[in-house]
Structure formats: structure tokens, C-alpha cells
Amino acid sequence: MRHYLGGGFDASGVPFPLVDPVTGRTVGAVPEASRELVDQAVAEARTALRGPWAAWSPAERSRLLHRIADGIEARFEEFAAAECADTGKPRELASTVDIPRAVANFRSYADLLAGRSERSWHTPTPDGRGALNYTVRKPLGVVAVVSPWNLPLLLLTWKVAPALATGNTVVAKPSELTPGTACLLAEVMDEAGAPAGVFNLVHGRGPDAAGQWLTEHPGVDAVAFTGASRTGTEIMRAAAARLAPVSFELGGKNAGLVFADADLEEAVAGTLRSAFTHSGQVCLCTERLYVERSVFDVFAAALAAGAKALSGYGPMVSAAHRDKVLGHLERAVADGGEVLAGGGVPRFGDERDSGFWVEPTVLAGLPEDHPAVRDEIFGPVVHLAPFDTEEEALALANAGPYGLAATVWTGDVRRAHRVAPALDVGIAWVNTWNLRDLRTPFGGVKASGIGREGGDHSLDFFSEPMNVCVKL
Ligand code: NAD
């Protein structure tokens, strides 16, 4: 595990342990970046901004992004293995979602960039000569990218690709829990010919460490962050001091609505995916499910049976996170919550018993203001509650501080188009979940984020439009 700055690798810093979530064992060490190293990385990124990189055409940047994608593909198995080692996620998930999406992140921005044009206007003037107005897009400068542990490479590259596409230089800080694929990405950048200092990587923790030093750094022009909402508040405070723009993808407490007219089999299968993919450790996962009362019992029984039958799922990422999830479950039971499935820790009879596992869990019967229904758990836990009317369903879904994503299960096309846009979220899925087209806007409202990423939205965030007006 090494830092990467100014085109060179660096292993300096006091090491902190890397723990395998599957077994709970310490399996390695990561060097913690010092404040001086963060300063140096930002300085390298600043120097690179004024170097040959500044003269690279969009076509050249587009080709670099494709070479990076090629580099990830060439080492696909290594990337998948590193992602599984750090997160404990099943191999199938890493090799069908995380790594292919990282490749797609680079390719989609490479292609988008190649076809992007700016508008210009001929503006009439009273003297008849007119003026030509055109827009110049400039990079923001040095961009800090701070990413979480749940989809480490996918979420890192989701920001690095458009940042590089638009000509910025980047200092990235991956989660201290999952640094493996970011290290491989630095190697791929190097091999792909990214100029020295264009992509830099520092490892370390958040508060009073590399994360904080980077995001409050006066040499950083913008911050792109994915992580918890409370961390977003801290980073925004730091960025506010120098009025640096931020793009935030934050937490969620995503609701699902199941109407009686839905294909219930499809809704159960979809909810098993939306609640339990990566053991609920995806920001888009459904944690609150509201089911129309006439089908509540049938649906709850089918979902509980499906949850009990799940196998091949992974652990929580850390002991602290496992304890947080189990704490929610204990309190839910103590407060009279009904456990329809799971609720405990699975026993394997092997080395996994010292890992950070939690069973896929279905709860019911808790009031809406209970912490398990109100707070983001970010684990394999979904709470079911009945509703009687569409208005009530919408009110329940829209309550609370978050607004990231929601799912609607219905067979009525009019209802689908009525309900989906009325949800206070950034993304609403109808009769599906996490079906992504990378050109679409991605992000949350309320405490779930600021700004949109994806397609042109990312290219817009990572560049500054400037108007030039020429009198003719
Ligand atoms: P986190 O906020 O604890 O950490 C995210 C990153 O921020 C890490 O790299 C961490 O080291 C760094 N960090 C922590 N404190 C910091 C500080 N004070 N200053 C600067 N950097 C700091 O989040 P996490 O536990 O790694 O990830 C889980 C959270 O991320 C959940 O809330 C989840 O919903 C959210 N998330 C959101 C999305 C999305 O797209 N909206 C995607 C994935 C995860």
C-alpha cells in the first residue's frame, strides 16, 4: 500500500492496520499520510495543472481515460481480488458491479468528452455590428476526491474520471478501510501515461488526518466527496472558509413503496436485491418499505422467507460498523419491534465466526420515529410498515431528513408517473432498483447530497464556464 504523488510511489508514514472483515484478522498495514505529505501532493497537483497537461486536447484526455479503462480491464482479476479482500464482498458482486462499473466510468466520460460541444451565440447590437458570445470551459484546478469504503473503486473513479476529463488535477483519498483498489488504480494511471502530478493518492483517516487536511487545504480548488452526511457537514465547513465548490453524495434512508397492484413476485425479488445487496452497504439500499395494507401480510411473509434463504452474502466492513448495526437491532427488539427474519449473527463453524457478520434482517412494528426507521443503518436491515392510501404512502416516504433514492412497485402506469415525481429524492426507480444509465443525473436532496453527478452534470461540476464577448 503506497501513496502516489508527482508520478512517484511513496510508502512513508506511520502504518495503521488493515483488517479482513470476513475473519476479523489483521492482514496488512497502510501508511498514514502526514500533513507534509498531503501538502506535497497538493503542490504536485498544482504544478501539474500548469505543465504539459494544460495543453492536452479533449481528444488526448479522452484517449488517456480509455487507456486507464484498458489498464483496469487488463488487471481485472487483481482489482476484483483487492476489492473483495478489503470489503469482504462476494466475488460475484465485485466482478459484475464494482470493477466493470469503474471501467465504464472512465469509458463513458471519455466518449462523452469526445462528443461535447459548447454553444455560442451571435448577439445583435443597436449599431448593427453585433457581438459574438462564446463559452470557454476551464478546469476548476486541483480537485480533492474523498471516497467511502462500500464501493471503493466504483465511487472513486466516478469522480476521478470526469475530473480528469475536464482537465483538472486530482488528489484522492480513499477510505482508510479499503485502500487496495486505489493503489492499483495509481499503478494503472502510471502505466497509462497520466502526466506526473495529474493523479495523486494519499492514504489516511478522516478527522485530524489526511481527509481533513486535504479538504481544508487552501491549495484545493474544489472537493468531490462521497460519504456520510455528518462528514459532509464537516467538509462543507472547511470548504466554506475559502468558498470552494463542493459536490456531495451523502447518506440515505431510502424508502420503497409496494402497491397492491404491483407484480408481488417481482416486488419481493426486487426488494431482496434493494435491501440486501452488499449486505445493505450501498447508499441506494432500501431500509424502509411501505406496503399497501391489503397485501402486507402476504408480502411480508414472502420477503421474510426470501431473506432467510439468502446465502453468499458478505460481512459488515468493520467491527465498529457491525456493532452499530447490531446496536440498532438490539434496540429495535427491546422497543417491541418484530423480527420477521434474521436479527442476529450467523454462525459458520469456521474462521468467519471472528468476522463482522450480520444476518439479512426484516423488521416490522416499529413507530416511524424509532431510530431503526429514522436513521441510516447501512446494513442488511429493512423495516416494513403498512399504508392505506397513496397520499399516506407518499407522506411516509417523504418524511425524514434524507432524500437519496426510492423505489415504487406498481402495475398502474398512471400511478407510477404520479407517485415517482412526487417523491422528495434525487432518484426514483419504478419496478426496478439500481438500474443505472451513466448519463443520467445522480445525487440526493435534503441531507443526501449537494449537486448532481453523471454525464454532463459531472462535466459541468468539474469545469467552470466562462463567457467571452467579442464586439464585431
Ligand atoms: P465517512 O463519511 O465516514 O467516510 C468517507 C470518507 O471521508 C473516508 O475516506 C473518510 O476517511 C473521510 N472522512 C471522514 N471524516 C472526514 C473529515 N472530517 N474530513 C475529511 N474527510 C473525512 O463515510 P463511510 O462510513 O466511509 O461511508 C458510508 C457513508 O457513505 C454512508 O452514509 C453512505 O450512505 C454514504 N454513501 C453515499 C453514497 C452516495 O452516492 N450518496 C455512496 C456511497 C456511500
Image (spheres, helix red, strand yellow):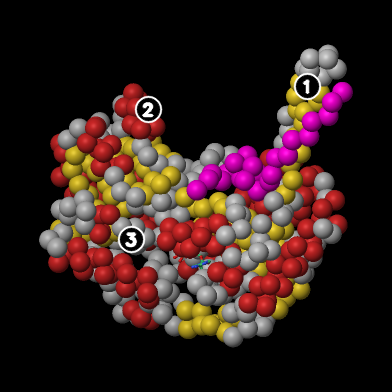
Q: Is residue 466 magenta?
A: yes
| Amino acid bearing label 1 | His
Residue at (77%, 28%) from the top-left corner?
133
The residue range painted magenta reads: 450-472
Q: CA distance from mark 2 to mark 3?
A: 29 Å
- Disc 2 secondary structure class: helix
**Residue 455 locus on image (x, y percent):** 61, 41
Q: Farthest residue in the bottom direction?
A: 14
Secondary structure of the residue carrying numbered label 1: strand
- Per the rendering, the mark at residue 417 is 2
- The numbered dot on residue 377 is 3
Whether residue 367 can be seen here: yes
Label 1 sits on residue: 122
Which is more toward the observer, 424 or 469? 469
What x and y, as percent, mark residue 197?
Answer: 76, 65
> Residue 139: image x %, image y %?
72, 49
Name which residue type carries label 2: His
With respect to residue 57, does 417 lie above or below? above
For the point 52% across and 75% down, the residue is 208
